[in-house]
Image (cartoon, rainbow, N blue to C red):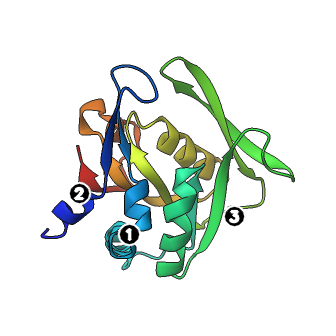
Amino acid sequence: MHDMPELRRLIKDVPDYPKPGIVFKDFTPLLADPRGLALAVELMANPFRTQRVDLVVGAESRGFIFGIAIAQALSAGFVPVRKAGKLPRAVRGVSYELEYGTDRLEMHADAVARGVRVLIVDDLLATGGTLAACSRLISECGGDTVGHTVLIELTALKGRSKLPDQALVHSVLEY
């Protein structure tokens, strides 16, 4: 696609962040560029325009940035999935493995009803842990994950293999 170099130009590599050996993909310059932001949201939403998406779920915290914009583009609602202890009402949660330990994601227990069609949004697909945990959470609520969309996928980490086979996985940029 002819606009990919424009998006890639707006993503800055930050070596050794958050720890030595990691090259962090900083997309905050893309957020500050109106054309880049609009293009990223469009490209993340487009594969799902012909699907019926009832809700968009965004994973804390960078999934919130794109999730709300994509929900608006698809005329869907938005549900935040938060780290443990951040939501004020009754929650449903799942724990998942990290490289060094475990973490927990939660959403309000009544946020996703049985049969609701959900698109999961995050900024990055790396190891797949966060997106897989979101899928599991939606499934446990009786919702149906119709897909996952991310701005960036780090293909060498093979995170896509952890996601449900029936759901479309879409990434705008692959590194």
The secondary element bearing badge 3 is classed as loop
Dividing the picture into quadrants, the one containing residue 114 is bottom right
Residue 81 drawn at (x, y percent): 64, 51
Residue 164 in view here = no
- The residue labelled by disc 1 is 33
Q: Disc 2 and disc 3: Cα gap in Å?
A: 40 Å
Left or right relative to 142: residue 127: left
Query: Which badge, 3 or 1, comes first in the chain's sequence?
Result: 1
160 is higher (above) or lower (below) than 108: above
Mark 3 or mark 1: which is in front? Answer: 1
The foreground one among 160 and 17 is 17
Residue shown at 54%/25% (left/top)?
A: 97
Name the kind of residue labelled 1 in the image.
Asp
Residue 7 drawn at (x, y percent): 26, 62
Q: Which residue appears farthest toward the right when viewing the image?
A: 89
Q: Give the class, few, some or many, for how many residues have Cα within 10 Å of label 2's Cα (few <14, many ≥20).
A: few
Dividing the picture into quadrants, the one containing residue 32 is bottom left
Name the kind of residue labelled 2 in the image.
Arg
Quadrant in the picture for the N terminus: bottom left
Query: Which badge, 2 or 1, comes first in the chain's sequence?
Result: 2
- The residue labelled by disc 2 is 9
Residue 145 drawn at (x, y percent): 49, 58
Dividing the picture into quadrants, the one containing residue 5 is bottom left
Q: Mark 2 and 1 residues: CB-CB less than 8 Å, in contact?
A: no
Number of residue marks: 3
Name the kind of residue labelled 3 in the image.
Ala
Q: Mark 3 and 1 residues: CB-CB less than 8 Å, in contact?
A: no
- The residue labelled by disc 3 is 113
Q: Disc 2 and disc 1: Cα gap in Å?
A: 11 Å
